[in-house]
Image (tube, rainbow, N blue to C red):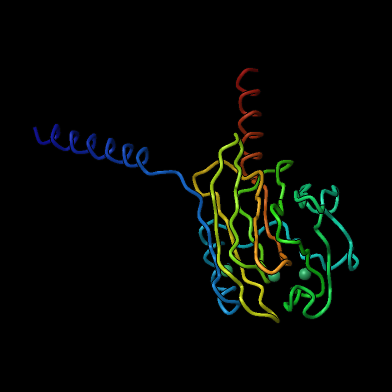
Amino acid sequence: MKKLTSMTFCLVAVVGILMSARIAPAAIMTFNSNTPANNSATRSNWLTAAGIVAPEYLVDFESGFVDNQDISGVGGLFPANLIITDTGASNDAIIRSGAGIINGSNPVGTFSVTQDELAFLELDFSANPVDYVGFQDIDHAETTGIVTFVGGGTANISFETTGVGGDSAEFFGIFRNDMPQITLVQLDASGDGRWGIDTIEYSPEPATLALLLIGGLALLRSRR
Ligand SMILES: [Ca+2]
Ligand SMILES: [Ca+2]
Ligand SMILES: [Ca+2]
């Protein structure tokens, strides 16, 4: 009888865990620094949530680019075939350098990509979907966005104003959490006409590919 009771208890516990896993809504996690002083701490929280020490890829525009270069829709510029596109009419994703060049704000380092704040500035990861992406937003008003996942689902994001000039860049991070991998991030800034992003960090999920390969090899061996 005692054995039966403990078995029943275990069964109820397992069913409870399964049900709570089913009921919990799937959602991405976002990490918004509200001031440049909080960039480091916010980025640390993002890394911890994603379970990583450092992202695989960094795009900081510091080498291989020149002032006024239009990178919109151009392939082959960034790791893992990331493509940055302005989908607005002006095809305006421009590398800029110089103090105060982004409506009074500075690039991070020497160069940033800047855009006219007309929807959308797109980060296209569809060639190699990612688990997480972070960047620093520079001199924007309220920004909204759409994250698209493998399979076509979407989630809306929003983050707040960087209101000052100078070194105003703030960190914003996205982690897919229990959602499918991310294929596209579309950003819709609005305000005074010019904003930028910099220090884009991301990684495809090599672990999944490795697991698939290991699983495939095991299957082949077992068939032999
Ligand atoms: Ca912010
Ligand atoms: Ca930079
Ligand atoms: Ca601006």
Q: Nearer the viewer, residue 196 or 223?
A: 196
Rendered location of residue 192, percent (x, y)? 69, 69
Number of marks drawn: 0
Q: Nearer the viewer, residue 200 or 188?
A: 188
Asked if residue 78 is positioned above or below residue 224 in the image, the reply reads below
Rendered location of residue 123, percent (x, y)? 71, 51
Rendered location of residue 40, percent (x, y)? 59, 73
Which quadrant would residue 42 be assigned to in this image?
Answer: bottom right
Q: Nearer the viewer, residue 26 or 20?
A: 26
- Judge left or right: residue 187 versus residue 91: left
Q: Residue visible at 50% across and 55% down? A: 29
Which quadrant would residue 108 be assigned to in this image?
Answer: bottom right
In the image as oriented, which residue stretches furthest toward the top? 224
In the image as oriented, which residue stretches furthest toward the left? 1
Q: Quadrant of the N terminus?
A: top left
Q: Residue visible at 68% across and 71% down? A: 139
Q: Residue visible at 14% across and 34% down? A: 3
Q: Quadrant of the C terminus?
A: top right
Q: Nearer the viewer, residue 186 or 49?
A: 186
- Judge left or right: residue 23 versus residue 91: left
Q: Residue visible at 18% across and 38% down? A: 9
Rendered location of residue 59, percent (x, y)? 76, 61
Quadrant hosting ligand 1:
bottom right
